[in-house]
Image (spheres, rainbow, N blue to C red):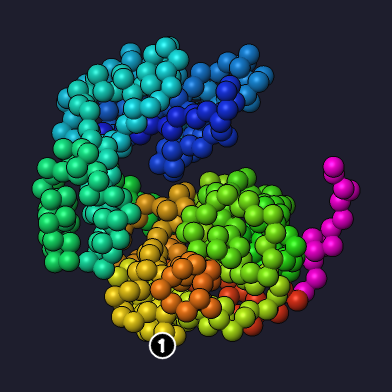
Amino acid sequence: MMPANSVAVIFAYPERTFSNDVNYVYHQNPDMYYLSGYNEPNSVLLIFKNMQGGGDTAYNEVLFVRERNPSQETWTGRRLGVEGAKSKLGFAHAYTGENFKKFAIDFKNFSTVLFDKIPVDVPNDGTGYDLAGLFKTFTDKAGVKPRNETLSSLKKTIKMGVTPQNISRFITYFNIDVLSKSDPEIGNDPVIKQILANPDSVQIAAIKKQLSATKDGIDSYEDIIALLRGTKTPEELALIRKAASISATGHAEVMRSVTPAMSEREVEGIHRYVHNRFGAEDEGYPPIVGAGANGCILHYEENSDTKIDNQLLLMDVACEYHGYSADVTRTIPANGKFTPEQKAIYQLVYYAQDSAMQLCREGATFGQISQKASAILANGLLQLGIIKDRKELSKYYPHGLSHHIGLDVHDKGGRDTLKANMVITVEPGIYIPANSDCDHKWWNIGVRIEDDVLITKNGFENLSAAAPRKWEDVEKKEAEKSAFKNLQLPAIN
C-alpha cells in the first residue's frame, strides 16, 4: 500500500507520569504494536517500500529499541533488548535507540516519508536516544517542519468520519468556532472556512475528495493504517472475540449481583474482577458506571455515587485482552424492575439498535445504519411526546451510532462502506437530564445499549451477545443469584 520509493517511520508512545516519580502502566502506540509486536517505550520502527542494500544484508524493516539495563530492570521489569527483538519478534535488523542517530539513512532520497503526528510534550532525559531524542534525530534528518497537529487531526476526522448528518455535532464537539478564532492557521484554513460558512449545505463529499488529493506524511500514513487496521485478521478477531466475551460476561454478572444499596464504584469492581478472572490485562477505557442523572452524562467516569438506589444504571465497561479492546454498554434497573417510563425509553433504544444491526453486512454503509437508528429514535420520541419535531433528536441523542474497535477502543478504519471482518459498535442512546423540555416523568432517564458487531459477507455476528439486551431478559438475569450479592466483608472504621 505504500507509495513508490517511500519509508514509514513509526514511533512508540511516551511514558506518562501518574504521580511524582510513579508512571502510569505503559501503553504502546497501537500502530507500533500492530506492526512490530514491540511493547516498550523509546523505540522507532522503519518500514521501507523497497529493499535497501543488497545480497544477504538487504533489509526492508529496521527496529530501534531500548537497551538492556540490569540495574533498571530490577526495578521496572525485564526489557526485550536487541536480541529479544530478533529472537522473539523476528527482526533481522534490530539496534538500540542510540544507533538511530548513526544509522546511514538519507530521508531526502525517498519520494515520500510516511509518519504520524509528533507530540511536543515528551519528557527528555538528555541522552539523545530516549523518545524525545529519537524525535529530534528524525526531524533533523528528514527536515520535517513543525505542523499544526490540531488542524491535521481535525482534517483527518473530517475525511474519515464527518457526514452531512453529523457535521453540526462535529462543529460543536470540537469547538470549531472557538478554535478558529484562537488559532489563525485553523481559522484561515479553506476547509474549516467552508464548513463554518454554511454547515447546513456544505458539500462534504467534495471536501473529502479535496483532502484526499492533498497528501503529506500524516495523511498518507493515516490512509494506509486505517485500511490495514480497519479490517481484522483471523488472529485479531480471535482476540476481539475473547475481549467481547469477557466483557459481556462481566455485564451479565453485574445484572445478577446488583442491589440498590451498592455504590457505583462497587459495581465497577465486579466488572474488573470478572475481567481479571478471565485473564484480561486492563480495561479498554475508563469504566463508565452512572446511576440516574449520572447516566445522562455521556463520558461520566467519576463512578463516585455511594448508593445507586432505585434508579437506572448505565454501564459502559469493557476489557482489553492482549491489546485488543471490546466496548459494551448495558442499562439496567438497580432494583430488578423497569418502571413504565424506563421501559418505554429502553424498548425504543433496543428497537433502534436491533433494526440498525439487521442492516449490518458487507456493502452497507455507516450512513445507512446510522440513519436507520436515528429515524426510529426520532419517531419514538415524537410518539412519546418528548420532542415536537424530529430535528430535536440531537438534544437527547447527541453522539454517533458506530465506530471501529480493535487495538484502540475507537479504532482506526474507514467510515464509508462496511467490509467483511470489520468489527464495529452499534450504540444508540437516549439521555434526558433533569429540567429537559418535556414531562418531568422522563427526567434522569439515560439509556444506551452497545454491542460489538463483526461484519460478515451476508450479515453480522454479535460478539457481546452473552450480556442480555431485551428488557425481559435483563429482568430475568437480575433475578438470578450471585456470590457478590451476599458477599460479607469485615467492617472498617
- Say which of 260 and 130 sits in front: 260
Instruction: Please tell me how many numbered marks the rendered image carries.
Output: 1
Vertical relation: 60 (above or below) 221: above
Q: Quadrant of residue 22?
A: top right
- Say which of 297 and 434 sits in front: 434
- Say which of 391 and 142 sits in front: 391
Mark 1 closeness class: few <14, some 14–19, many ≥20 residues within 10 Å: few
Instruction: Name the residue tied to disc 1.
Output: 383
Give the x, y percent position of residue 381: 41, 81
Q: Secondary structure at mark 1?
A: helix
Q: For this view, does 375 lie left or right of residue 195? A: right
| Magenta residues, dominant SS class | loop
Which residue is found at the position 61% from the left and 69% from the top?
312
Give the x, y percent position of residue 1: 26, 47
Q: For this view, does 18 lie left or right of residue 195? A: right
Boundaries of the magenta span: 480-493
Q: For this view, does 326 lie left or right of residue 304? A: left
**486 in magenta:** yes
Give the x, y percent position of residue 407: 47, 49
Quadrant of image for the C terminus: top right
Which residue is found at the position 15% from the left and 33% from the top?
111
Which residue is found at the position 71% from the left and 72% from the top?
335
